[in-house]
Image: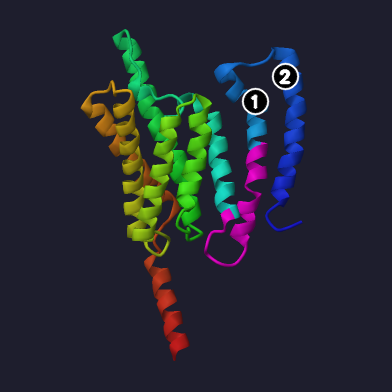
Amino acid sequence: MPAGYGLSLIGCVLFGIGGVIDMFWHLRFGIEVSLAALVSPPHLLLMFSLGLIVTGPLRAAWRRPGIRAPLTAIVSASLLLSMFTFFDQFDQPLVNPWAAAQASSPSTLAYVQQLGILGIMVQTALLMGVILYLLSRFTLPFGSLTLLVGLNGVMLGSLEQHFELIAVAVVGGLLADLAVLWLRPGPERVIALRVASFVGPVAVSSLYLLVIELTRGIGWPVTLWLGSILVSGAIGFLLSCLTVHPQPPALIEIARAAEGGRSV
């Protein structure tokens, strides 16, 4: 078996076990609908199993030499992201555009606004988490993020037939590719990584809300939608601080000493 696919095999076994558990769960508690169907324990086991299965190519690429991400790793990461967002679809901006929702009472309006901002925050965290994970190991060929974000956007936008929002994902991924091409973020270019991690979510969130305004109209006050854009950038920046760290000064000195010794 190729390196990296052992956990995928375990995932296949767990998926079969989860299917049997799910059958007995339905017989005992009935068939779940709506939100309950997404978070029922057997379905969460199935989600975990799928995560192990679809990340086999990513794990295999991680173990191989070379720093350029292969297509299989990008597709694998996109499937992982799409699995997360599928189970989070009840508050996904591309599935439920809460920013355009109208409310009949102040309490309902506050509820809708909270869901809208939370959706942007969660989507930013999931998306940037996957992207930063890739950047911590690979350099990404141009088009990688367009594929990753676009494929995820197609799956999400098709759930409720919000096809105009699919363009947001595709264009947002293209903007992210351009930012990576320009800034070349990575573990060796930490400042560029921090900048890209802030600018990327800000650009995508701005594009999303702009499309919502043009197609449906935003029901939020300016403080709310502008704040949600800045919060998305802050989430990306903070996640970059957690995933990629600059080398400690002691390690830098050791590396320089080693380079000096080799030159002598």
Give residue 91's quadrant in the image.
Answer: top left
Residue 68 located within the stretch drawn in magenta: yes
Give residue 234's quadrant in the image.
Answer: top left
**Which residue is at a point 47% across and 39% down the rendered structure image?**
126
Q: Magenta region: which residues?
A: 49-71
Q: Quadrant of the C terminus?
A: bottom left
Give neighbour class at mark 1: few <14, some 14-19, many 20+ (Cα, 10 Å). some
> Outermost residue toward the bottom?
264
Specify whether residue 53 is in view: yes
Residue indicated by mark 1: 41
Q: Quadrant of the N terminus?
A: bottom right
Give neighbour class at mark 2: few <14, some 14-19, many 20+ (Cα, 10 Å). some
Whether the residues at callouts 1 and 2 have beta carbons within 8 Å, the answer is: yes
Q: CA distance from mark 1 to mark 2?
A: 9 Å
**Which residue is at a point 32% across and 38% down the rendered structure image?**
207
Q: Which mark is residue 25?
A: 2
Residue 162 vertical position relative to residue 104 in the rendered view, above or below: below
Residue 69 located within the stretch drawn in magenta: yes
- Relative image position of residue 5 (x, y in whole percent): 70, 52
- Relative image position of residue 41 (x, y in whole percent): 64, 25
> Outermost residue toward the top?
105
Residue 223 vertical position relative to residue 138 in the rendered view, above or below: above
Residue 110 vertical position relative to residue 232 in the rendered view, above or below: above
**Which residue is at a point 68% across and 26% down the rendered structure image?**
42
Looking at numbered disc 2 in the image, what kind of residue is underneath it? Answer: Trp
